[in-house]
Image (spheres, coloured by chain):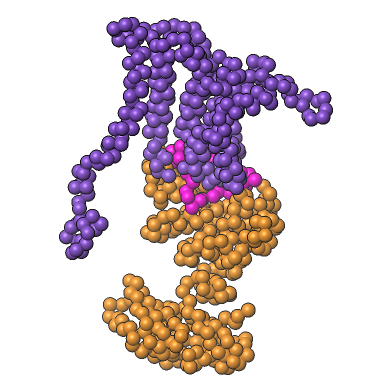
Chain colours: A purple, B orange
Amino acid sequence: MSAQAPAGAPPETRGSVSPRFRLRIFPVWSWLWYFLGALYFILPLYATLDFSLRMERGVLGLKAYGVAFADRGFLQSFGYSVWLAVVTIIVSILLVVPTAYWIRLRLPQARRIVEFITLLPFVIPAIILVFGFIRIYSSPIGIPFTDVQLLAPLTTSKLGTNALIVAGYVVLGLPYMYRSVDTGMRTVDVRTLTEAAQSLGANWATIMTRVILPNVRTALLSGALLTFAIVVGEVVLASYLGLPTFGPYLFLLGQHRAYEPAALTFTTFLLTWAAMGIIQLVTGGQGQVAGAH
Amino acid sequence: MAFLSIQHASKNYGSAVAVEDFNLEIEKGELVSFLGPSGCGKTTTLRMVAGFEVPSSGKIELSGVDITSRPPNQRNVGMVFQAYALFPNMTVADNVGFGLKVANKPTADIRRRTDEMLTLIRMPQLGDRYPYQLSGGQQQRVALARALAIQPSVLLLDEPLSALDAKIRVELRSEIRRIQQQLGITTIYVTHDQEEALSISDRIVVMSAGRMEQVGTPFEIYNFPKTAFAASFVGTLNQLRCTVVDADQAKLAFDGQTFTAAAPIRAAKGASVVAALRPEELHIGRFDGENQLTGTVEAVTFLGGIVRIRLALGESRITLDALNERRLTLPKVGETQTVSFPPHACWVMVES
């Protein structure tokens, strides 16, 4: 290689340094920043873990975990949050998949508006969302200047409050779910696939179930798991709507106890990582397929 | 009555006209190419036949039945896309069998038909592969097999070879023609590649700016173009701006030299017309009974099978193609050379 480089040419730019030599240069700065970044995340985590193991004086043990898990409040609130997360994920998929699909297929001009809407949760804090909810849905909704009532107050019934919090969670998860699904659809060119399926005689239901959904499965899963993580850790919406979810439980526990909240925090962290691991596993298996397109 | 009939089809997007008054009758078993530059409306016309676009006006009939507003999944039309559009989550065999599965055919029938199709495209052993494990050429073969598996009334190919490299393109186009003739399937082939259109079509529709310029066999389109666009888009063409010297005798003056065209010219003496000549009809040297023009050699390009020579005549340029031979002496740049051509090789395009 170096023999072909014109005389006098700067070696770095003319490729006279062999690639093997270049690989051997240790990227000191990259590793330093990587190390500092890792430390930033790992240190507090380590401190939490360490603290959670010291419930018994002078011994490292899992007592805090035992106590935390034994509390019925933990299982109840965690189970409730998981249930809300599942409902939220189903509602999100039903809302986002057809929307993203239709925008790709027929309404590309609506993309900017929808992207803007999906980003709103980043600029409007959850506290504003929940106050809005309470303001609007705690009194009956009717047609102005008439006595006609369209909707009973939602905050006075359990079903209504559950519906409200799920709606709120759908909004909070929207940026993640929409982006995941939209990116998934971009990588498989849904428009042409839809037309190919149509020309082969498929109707909309067949196209959705046999062509579109299987090809955005990975994207759906990552959107779903991110939504799951948000719902399980959410505090503001649940507190103000007065629902006994995991977030407020952990918050309350933190005010009365020392070691158990640390144990539960570490546990939820592990659960989130397990969720990420599942994403990795699934996308790893499909990586080649996606890469081929 | 024609098998597929497109009658006065137009398509507008707001004020933009994509296709204007398209009329074509296609016989059963015929392969017709739509040829033109991008944006000429060829794909839009194809998509109207497929049902992906609804004509703004006009009618499309298949076997005498009006299918203009029938949805694409009820037309029994096979379509092959430029981007292959194979379903990434399915194997080759599942892709090919998809249409039959959708139609609820028995599993044994689907398997038999899939095997038949894979044999037809000469890939019988690759049914278990996934699309990402295939090359572009193989993927497009599978897409063809998938479109044919449903035994469509019409096969539509939308620039099927554009994404492939040159060698595969040539191979696959003769493969497509072989399969089309073997099955006797009525086919519309959209392309911007004139060589592709000339080599595989029974008839070609040359299109420009949403309009049909000319319909004819490849031989007619190439040798007897009816419009200036058709003449210049298909093949290389010398266009010489001449002055009419004698319209009845077809005598023209160009760069101070006179020559004779094929037929009497429908223009007055002294009028400015364009004389057209294909490069392969010109030869270096003086030949008796032929027209002669003299100019300076400006470029000599060796292309393998042919040698392309460009001559400067005043402000104009003439290109000629000579067949390569080992004993050929190539003219040198800057030399003065005379080129000859028979009067019948030259036709006159009167500007509209």
Image height of B244 relative to B25, above or below: below
Q: Is residue B216 left or right of residue A33?
A: right
Q: Is residue A50 above or below residue A171?
A: above
Residue B98 appears in the rendering = no
User: Nearest the camera: A231 or A215?
Assistant: A231
In the displayed structure image, the side of residue A19 where residue B344 appears, left or right: right
Quadrant of the image occupied by residue A33: top left
Quarter residue A107 falls in: top right
Question: What x and y, as percent, mark residue B112?
Answer: 47, 39
Q: Furthest residue to the right?
A: A146
Q: Residue at x 38, y 29 (%)?
A: A281
Q: Is residue B316 above or below residue B205?
A: below
Counting from the top left corner in percent of width and height, residue B175 is at: 43, 55
Bounds of the magenta segment = B71-99
Residue B196 appears at what percent x and percent y? 46, 63
- For the image, the number of numbered tags is 0
Q: Which of A191 and B74 lies nearest the eye of the viewer?
A: A191
The single residue placed furthest to the front in the displayed view is A255
Considering depth in this image, is B105 or B45 the residue closer to the camera? B45
Residue at left offset 66%, top offset 52%: B54
Which of the image's four quarters has the C terminus of chain A?
Answer: top left
Quarter of the picture holding the N terminus of chain A: bottom left
Q: Where does the image place residue A183, in percent across and percent down from the top left?
A: 48, 40
Q: Is residue B204 left or right of residue A69?
A: right
Residue at the spot x=33%, y=71% of the render? Answer: B304
Residue B73 showing in the rendered view: yes
Which residue is located at x 39 percent, y 80 percent?
B310
Is residue A166 part of the magenta span, yes or no?
A: no
In which quadrant of the rendered view does residue B164 lie?
bottom left
**Viewer-side residue, B179 vs A34:** A34
**Residue sticking out furthest to the left:** A3
